[in-house]
Amino acid sequence: EDFRKYGAGVLEDFSKWAEYSRKLEVVEPNYEGVRVNYDLDGSRGWFLLRMSLHDPVMPLNIESETPGGVDKAMAAICDFMKDYKEIEIPEA
């Protein structure tokens, strides 16, 4: 019910998850949300998770320098998000 509080908690946990991963690097400062550079099995790129200013959604942007990198990043993010039952992840 309190989306802003729940979303802030997700972002805090997301940042901690990325900080403790060897393959992820949190980019600081970032005023939009949590931006992370990644290197997953040779696929490099970045992703950004943030809260919408007006709607109860958390936009996620992913970019990759290599083919298939977005899929690898999405798999890692989905693995992190599996415990957050209030977050709906649309099928691609």
Image (cartoon, rainbow, N blue to C red):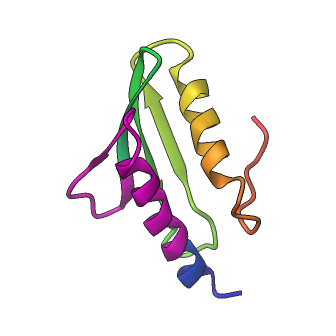
**Picture coordinates of residue 43, whole percent (x, y):** 44, 18
| Residue at x 65%, y 54% (from the top left corner) | 81
Q: Which quadrant, please, contains the N terminus?
A: bottom right
Residue 69 vs residue 21, the one in the foreground:
21
Magenta stretch: give its range.
8-34
* Rendered image quadrant of residue 29: bottom left
Q: In the drawing, does residue 68 fall left or right of residue 18?
A: right
Q: In the drawing, does residue 37 fall left or right of residue 70?
A: left
Residue 21 part of the magenta-drawn span: yes
**Picture coordinates of residue 91, whole percent (x, y):** 79, 40
| Residue at x 74%, y 69% (from the top left corner) | 86
| Residue at x 55%, y 73% (from the top left corner) | 7
| Residue at x 61%, y 50% (from the top left corner) | 80
Q: In the drawing, does residue 28 fall left or right of residue 53?
A: left
Does 31 sit above or below residue 76? below
**Picture coordinates of residue 55, whole percent (x, y):** 61, 73
* Rendered image quadrant of residue 83: bottom right
Residue 69 vs residue 14, the one in the foreground:
14
**Picture coordinates of residue 16, whole percent (x, y):** 41, 59
Q: In the drawing, does residue 40 fall left or right of residue 29?
A: right
Does 72 sit above or below residue 9? above
Residue extending farthest to the bottom is 2
